[in-house]
Image (spheres, helix red, strand yellow):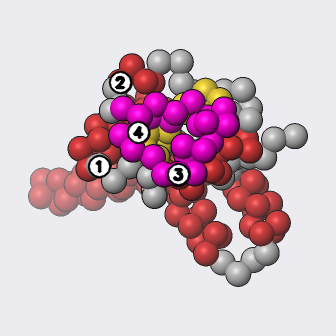
């Protein structure tokens, strides 16, 4: 069985694009190698390790600038570059995806990212960290988070409705006092 990438997605056989192959990209590429994903790496330059992975056929490495066409047929894209301009361009794509999937999903992903940092920085043993991260990123955890967010939204709407009724009652009482 293939290892999982820390996002806990099954990537085996799926085309994954990594933009960048320097000191930022190399560890991300390295962590993807055991997932069974078909790795396509596009970068202006690459570390020696990334070049070795390309020569060994573990990744498809192209030394050139990223273009939007690189996303065609891609299941997942990872930006691993220090280029502010490129990061901003791909951030726009992320924002489009968040709009497509909705704010609840975007909030869950953000919270998961923060929790992941805490778990990885903890003193737990690696197997315990892996198990915890797998459970946090599971479909069940996502569904629970979305349900909790929906319940919180409904509760907030209910409280607003109660506030409106109470405000109307007070206003009506004041109107009756003025006319009496």
Disc 2 target residue: 68
Q: Which of marks 4 and 1 is in front?
A: 4
Within 10 Å of disc 4 (Cα), the crowding (few <14, some 14-19, many 20+) is some
Disc 4 target residue: 43
Q: CA gap, disc 2 to disc 3?
A: 26 Å
Q: Which of marks 3 and 4 is nearer the N terminus?
A: 4
Disc 3 target residue: 48
Q: Which of marks 1 and 3 is nearer the N terminus?
A: 3
Q: CA gap, disc 4 to disc 1?
A: 11 Å
Q: Give the SS element for disc 3.
A: helix
Q: Can residue 120 be seen in this view?
A: yes
- Quick one: which residue is furthest to the bottom in this view? 123
Q: CA gap, disc 3 to disc 4?
A: 13 Å
Picture quadrant where residue 12 is located: top right
Disc 1 target residue: 83
Q: Nearer the viewer, mark 1 or mark 3?
A: 3
Within 10 Å of disc 3 (Cα), the crowding (few <14, some 14-19, many 20+) is few
Tell whether 59 sits left or right of 82: right
Tell whether 84 sits left or right of 51: left
Q: Which residue is drawn at 65% across and 70% down?
A: 119
Q: CA gap, disc 2 to disc 4?
A: 13 Å
Q: Give the range drawn in magenta.
A: 41-64
Q: Which of marks 2 and 3 is in front?
A: 3
């Amino acid at each position: 069985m293939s290892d999982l990438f820390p996002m806990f997605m099954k990537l085996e056989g799926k085309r994954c694009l990594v933009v960048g192959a320097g000191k930022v990209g190399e560890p991300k590429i390295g962590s993807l190698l055991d997932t069974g994903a078909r790795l396509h790496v596009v970068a202006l330059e690459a570390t020696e390790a990334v070049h070795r992975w390309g020569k060994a056929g573990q990744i498809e490495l192209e030394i050139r600038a990223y273009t939007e066409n690189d996303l065609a047929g891609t299941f997942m894209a990872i930006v691993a570059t220090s280029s502010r301009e490129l990061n901003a361009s791909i951030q726009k794509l992320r924002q489009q995806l968040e709009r497509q999937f909705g704010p609840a999903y975007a909030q869950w992903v953000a919270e998961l990212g923060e929790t992941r940092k805490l778990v990885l920085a903890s003193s737990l043993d690696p197997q315990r960290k892996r198990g915890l991260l797998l459970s946090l990123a599971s479909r069940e955890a996502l569904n629970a988070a979305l349900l909790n967010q929906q319940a919180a939204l409904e509760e907030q709407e209910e409280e607003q409705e109660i506030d409106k009724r109470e405000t109307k009652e007070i206003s009506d009482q004041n109107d009756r006092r003025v006319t009496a």
